[in-house]
Image (cartoon, grey):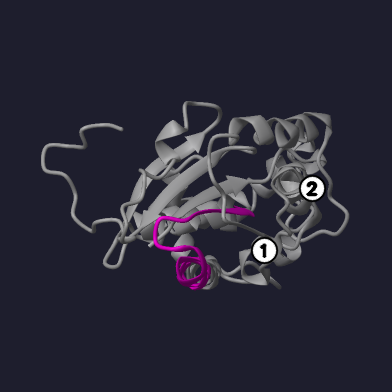
Amino acid sequence: MTTLILLRHARSAANAAGVLAGRSPGVELDETGREQAATLVSRLSGVPIADIVTSPLTRCRQTVAPLAADRGITPRTEPDLAEVDYGEWTGGELKKLAKDPLWKVVQAHPSAVVFPGGEGLAGMQARAVAAVRRHAERIAAEHGPQAVWLACTHGDVIKAILADALATHLDNFQRIVVDPGSISVIHYTPTRPFVARVNDLGGDISGLVPAKRRRRRSARSSDAVVGGTTGT
């Protein structure tokens, strides 16, 4: 039931400065980030994209703007794909936050973390996964089960969605790397998702293009290939 391209926003000024931007207003892409956003147009040129969904934060909207303009798509804003509400940690320098006792809990037992004055990582995962599932169902109904769509959001949010797709506990999500400007890909089926790509920064993405449709559109199989896939 649809293929989701998870795009982490391109590099922001806060990323470059080592600051936890969180939901701080006005955080924009830096020069490198703007180049990454522009490159996305050619990088995904061969992939049919049915819809674009984005976090409401400026850095995400700036990241998808060139692609959306090229495809003639008006991005849908999804509040449940917003960055984690880091509360009192928002705007802090990462090197200083690393000295906070809570940092070790964030690393080793993130499912138990609730940021002071903010939200918990478990709550973030619940809202983000629900949003992705909701849009996947909508897009499948509007464009068919082979539709490809893109969601631009944030590092921890993407890691949490990937952890859910991999059926691994949220406490393992720190083992997943998601860099600015990277794409990760999940194929959703009626019974389970398949993670096709993680933290891709420029590899061949021709495999994302759906196979030619038969006369009757059918959903992607929920079965894994025994022995591994045979390639595209």
Amino acid residing under circle 2: Gln
Q: On residue 170, which mark appears? A: none
Query: Does any portion of residue 20 appear in the rendered image?
Result: no
Bin the neighbour count of mark 2 within 10 Å (Cα to Cα): few under 14, some 14-19, many 20 and up: some
What's the CA distance linking mark 2 and mark 1?
14 Å
- Residue at x-position 66% and y-position 68%: 78
Residue 88, position as x, y percentages in the image? 75, 64
In reply to whether residue 147 is colored magenta, the answer given is yes
- Name the front one of labels 2 and 1: 2
Residue 182, position as x, y percentages in the image? 57, 37
Left or right? Give the position of 158 relative to 115: left
Could you say which is closer to the camera, residue 97 or residue 132?
132
Left or right? Give the position of 192 relative to 110: left
Bin the neighbour count of mark 1 within 10 Å (Cα to Cα): few under 14, some 14-19, many 20 and up: many
Q: Which residues are magenta?
A: 133-152
Residue located beneath label 1 in the image: 82
